[in-house]
Image: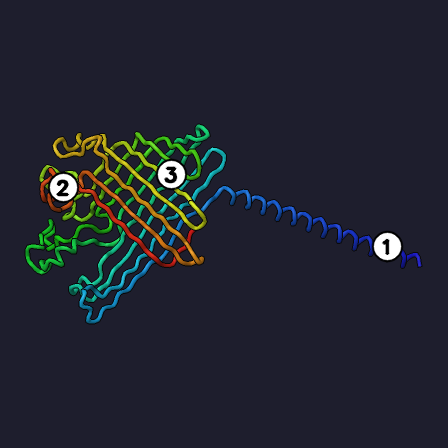
Amino acid sequence: MKKGFLLLSLCVMAVMAVNAQVDEKTAADEALKTKVKSAEIDSAKHWKFTGVTGLNAAQTALFNWVAGGNNNVTGFVFANLTLSYKKNKWTWDTNLDTELGEMYSSDYKQGFRWRKANDKINLTTKVGYQMHPQWYLTLLGSFRSQYAPGWDYKKVDDGIWNADTTFVVDADGNRVDRSLISKWLSPSYTDLALGVEYRPNDIFTIGVYPVAGRMTTCLDSTLRPNYGLPVRDDGTYKAVGLNMGLRINGGINYTLVKNLKIISTITLFTPYTARIHDKENGQKFGNFDVDWDLAVTYNFLKVFSVSLMTSLKYYDKVMIDGPAWGKYSEGPRARVQFKEVIGLGIGYSF
């Protein structure tokens, strides 16, 4: 009897010991899960992702339409996305502003029925250290270019596409069409700048970067004279141009009312060193290159959007052919570039 009671007591004590260990392990696991979840929440609260994206399309079909017009299909995708990180006195902001669109018409000449309608890639990233509640020491990098080849379609439509005068011979002896005006990395602009930014709130920023380097790239040798690339002693153009200068930029990211978002950026750049490299043709300090982009989007019924997008550019050494205007003569020279797109399609704003 005593042996049985002793054996039963030992069994009970063993079960209690095992249960105690299980309870301790469960408590430890729960504590670890709580700690990990708290760390994840703490990490996530430092990140913020905002932007707009969408797809716009239109189609026109004509049959015996006496008023005239072209059968065509047009579509383009766009995105303006910003990823921000902020912890203690450090910030990191990255913005991608991009769009690509095509237009097709069976009425266009063979070989040019597909035409580029929109094309832009602007990528900017910057790291800031808070020196004052509204002032940040900032290191910035940016890249601007386009995805696909661009053509002077007016030359095509004027009927000179097949004429020999539209071709030139490059340094490798290849015939190149003169109606080509741009392509990937021809041109492109890459900036690296150090300066100070003023950020009074989450809506508005303005920055001044007195130490700014710009690398202008044009891989296509036939296009280099149009984009202000440096000239070698033998008269040929370099593929890459480097300049130090002053950069000024500003930005707005504002939700005016629910589902109505306004995003705008402007960048100004003027070189210190262009005249050192080329005393006669180098860009003067104070002549600013300008990039100004604006996107206004309104979302309705959750998935549909109306968008207005504009881009204004002026580059002091980008030569654009055109008519005379005021005191300026006809022919290639620096001109204001402007693009405006109004679209209706599928979109999302966040």
**Which mark sits nearer the N-terminus, 1 or 3?**
1
- Residue 320 or residue 303, whichever sits in front: 303
Label 2's element?
A: loop
**Which mark sits nearer the N-terminus, 1 or 2?**
1
Q: Nearer the viewer, mark 1 or mark 2?
A: 2
Q: In this figure, which colouring scheme has been used for the structure?
A: rainbow
- Left or right: where 246 falls relative to 178: right
- Left or right: where 33 falls relative to 277: right
**Which mark sits nearer the N-terminus, 2 or 3?**
3
Pointer 1 residue: 9
Instruction: Locate residue 241, reporting x and y percent.
Output: 21, 39
Label number found at residue 126: 3
Which amino acid, mark 2? Arg
Q: Where, quadrant-wise, is the N terminus in this rendering? A: bottom right
Tell me which residue sits at (26%, 65%) in the image.
60
- Residue 75 or residue 18, whichever sits in front: 75
